[in-house]
Amino acid sequence: MSTMVASSLESLLRRRKPGYSLEAPFYTSGEIFEADLDIIFRRHWIYVGVEPDVPEPGDCMVVDIGAASVIIARDDDMGLRAFHNVCRHRGARLVLDEKTTVGNIVCRYHQWTYGLDGSLLFAEHMGPGFDTACHGLKKVHLRNVAGLIFICLAAEPPADIEDMARDLEPYIAPHDIANAKVVQQIDLVEEGNWKLTMENNRECYHCSVNHPELTIPLFAYGFGYSPDEVDDVGREQIARYDGLVRDLETRCEARGIGAREIDHLDDRVTGYRAQRLPIDQHGESQTMNTQVACKKLLGGLNDAKLGGLSVWTQPNSWHHFMSDHIVTFSVLPLGPERTLLRTKWLVHKDAVEGVDYDLRNLTSVWAATNNQDGELVGYAQSGARSPAYEPGPYSVHTEMLVEKFTNWYVGRMSAHALAPEFADCGAR
């Protein structure tokens, strides 16, 4: 960062007002966007995909994070590895497609050839003194958390991902991601800063008016409400919801399946939260009729009514796990005012389309919800550009998780960008 940019960022971080949205430059400034890439996306664990993205030896997936391009590869021993997608010869990009299958990783430019372990196997015309052992692919840290793949571009990644893995694996493992398959991926470019995409996800204040499909299976009251503004009908709905929560927790815990809320969204370097929420009506899945969309349940599950396990990670993901399918979301910044929202739907690997599931039924709720959210993010971005914009107050009843996201963000930016006396604010 230049001195001027660092000074501007430092001023903005120091005067951040807790309980309020961020100042406009956090959403519009190209310089702060570059600082976000440097501090948040190059020094923390970033969610990039699932094990079934690369199910067989030789399968590769490419993920771009800012200027960095990373290959996720399945090696011959079924291990997962991550490498920078850069040839050690003259820097050409190696794998050009988002997904492909290879025997070895071969650079198209001069045919330097790498094994799936990243070692350089072949480099013609380099002379007898050339040492292939010194020119293997540069490794990227990878952590597989019960089938969710996280990578970290830093030389020394945050060690507390092990805490996240220890806490989340009992919740996620029953859904057996490794034995699922990706049946749909939709990439949506939202015309807004990546933080607006994340903030929009961290609350359901906007759901009742904007998400007619999502509010069929989900209870808006599950994401908070103002007790002074609830009428008799509302109190009955809340009492019913609370009863469903208690019943779901009892049934899941009897099966050894995680259900109760765990929340470390803003008190850890690697922030996370998980909670299993009841589903309305038939209580089975996040579909238009609230029934399972796939006849073949995931893993060894034999109860369709397990609600929806919601998992959030900082800085860039959220996930929904039902008995019959999984939906995962990753947020990747493309520019100060453009963001890629990548959504994947998974079902049991043996499920057959047209027999066990209908793809449109499977994807309808979240495909519609994503489009609606994309519009809302665009509206928020337009407002952030206005000279009339100023940070507004979050609802203490329904936007607690938005506050935790911005608190985590400011804490992590401060830890790297401010003087030592301020470096311990926010997440540690």
Image (spheres, grey):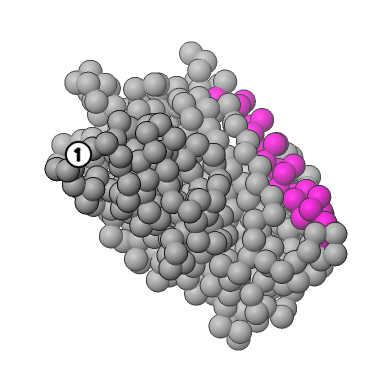
Q: State yes or no: residue 396 in magenta.
A: no
Tell me the residue at 58%/26% (across/down): 191
Give the percent coordinates (x, y) of residue 296: 76, 71
Magenta region? 357-381
Circle 1 is placed at which residue position?
127
Give the percent coordinates (x, y) of residue 126: 23, 37
Q: State yes or no: residue 378 in magenta.
A: yes
As displayed, is residue 104 above or below residue 309?
Answer: above
The N terminus appears in which quarter of the rendering?
Answer: top left
Tell me if I can see residue 224 in this picture.
Answer: no
Q: Nearer the viewer, residue 421 or 96?
A: 96
For the stretch drawn in magenta, the main secondary structure is helix
Tell me the residue at 43%/68% (across/down): 77
As displayed, is residue 280 above or below residue 189?
Answer: below
Q: Nearer the viewer, residue 123 or 286?
A: 123
Give the percent coordinates (x, y) of residue 203: 58, 46
Image quadrant where residue 251 sits: bottom right
